[in-house]
Image (cartoon, grey):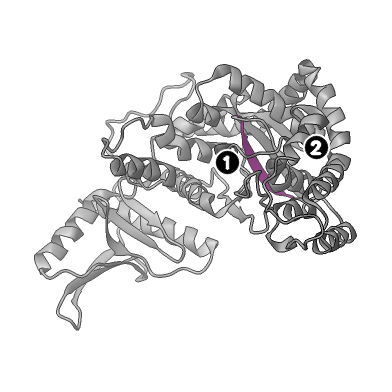
Amino acid sequence: MNTRILTGITTTGTPHLGNYVGAIRPAVEASRRDDVDAFYFMADYHALIKSDDAARIERSRLEIAATWLAAGLDPQRVTFYRQSDIPEIPELTWFLTCIASKGMLNRAHAYKAAVDKNTAAGEDADAGITAGLYMYPVLMAADILAFDANQVPVGRDQIQHIEMARDLGQRFNHLHGHEFFVLPEALIEEQVATLPGLDGRKMSKSYDNTIPLFAGGKKQLRETIMRIVTDSRAPGEPKDPDDCALFTIFRAFASETETAAFRRALLDGIGWGEAKQVLYERIEADVAPMRERYEALMADPAAIEAILQQGARKARAIAAPKVAALREVLGLRAMTTAPARIDQPKAAPKQGKMPRFASFRDADGSFRFRLFSAEGEELLLSKPFADPKAAGSLQKHIKALGAAAAVLQIQPLGMSLELDGEAVASTPDYRDGQARDEALAQLRDALDQLAAQE
């Protein structure tokens, strides 16, 4: 069975060389593997969080679609679509919103960064922060879970979002007693190439230091490369290739032989103007054929639209049956038969062993307790308390929570149970994804059983 890999592309700008080397080129290469079922989508709903300029978003969608296709993405081989063409995604977002804990969303990196920025500026903590930014992780979870993606390529700053998607998928599965969702894994992109921009910093639209991939044609590409900042060493003076933006960019496009020759030229004192011309010619050799395809695509938006609509049909063939099944389990069914009466008494629970708390006193005199499963496995260890009454009060609070209300924070090797933003108990370590999911399901079962006793 092929591994399903899903990648989103936010539609808020014009692609540049850094985008091509760091994301587009490796993604297109990966899509050609026989063991990969690749899904690529333009995240235009996500773009609305970052931009309210309709013309910019519209233009960006066209440019990004044309860029990926010009770079060699084969729409017959992959599923290539617009997020906004899949109505099941916002519907699933709402289903997940209804089980997402506020505590989890409060810890999302983007939201916390915005709050910290406001606080540092002396503003109200939530000044200018939209619900869209706050709910961004839930929309991203819906993007992933709707298609049962096995892996999602991300940088380390995005791992938290994949963990949230896993948590929401696992929570839904647990609440409804069936494996509705495949739980995704983060595919960490350790070797992603990062190009320096015109000023030596990372190439980024945020720094306004990018080199356009196609915009403006070959003339603008050359003019922009000629503006790359260099030092004052004159022709004939040796240049250090390992501290040179020109060499870093050249190496991202060149063969080993070409790279070695350029390194030697820099050490031998090639002038900066000549070095920039060599860099331009090397990049242009790769970009020119793609630019020709790009310009043909940009001149025929209807052809791009047809490709995206075809991709949407392929994507919806997966998402629509899944969301239909979720509607059924949530009670959003067609009224063709009378539902069971909700005032009928529930069947008495089966008698047997139940999860239990065990209190104890540490060697330092503090009071703690453990939560054990019905089978006797340790599920939680509380933090230490100076007062045994406080430990007992926490036990009662945990009993009343139930799994749906509990805030469980997933850590690299375990989980913590949080109340009012404070970690009050933790699980034993687990060692792999499967053990983590089993531990999460077991803990939620125990919490639900305790709540049912109250």
Q: In the image, residue 332 lies at what x, y percent?
A: 45, 25
Q: Identify which residue, 222 or 14, lies in the foreground.
A: 222
Rendered position, 114 above or below 306: below
Q: In the image, residue 159 lies at what x, y percent?
A: 52, 52
Rendered position, 85 above or below 255: above
- Number of marks in the rendered image: 2
Circle 1 or circle 2, nearest the eye: 2
Write the residue at 66% across / 34% down.
41
Q: Is residue 399 visible in this depiction of the protein?
A: yes
Q: Is residue 1 visible in this depiction of the protein?
A: no
Give the residue number, with chain letter if any, for mark 1.
Answer: 144
Cβ–Cβ under 8 Å for marks 1 and 2: no
**Viewed as shown, does residue 447 lie left or right of 80?**
left
Q: Identify which residue, 175 or 53, lies in the foreground.
A: 53
Q: Residue 288 appears in which quarter of the rendering?
A: top right
Does the magenta segment cover residue 363?
A: no
Name the main secondary structure of what is drawn in magenta.
strand
**Amino acid tagged 1:** Ile
Write the residue at 55% across / 38% down.
206
Stretch in magenta: 1-11
Q: In the image, residue 154 lies at what x, y percent?
A: 60, 50
**Viewed as shown, does residue 64 lie left or right of 99?**
right
Question: Element at badge 1?
Answer: helix
Question: Element at badge 2?
Answer: loop
Give the residue number, with chain letter if any, for mark 2.
Answer: 71
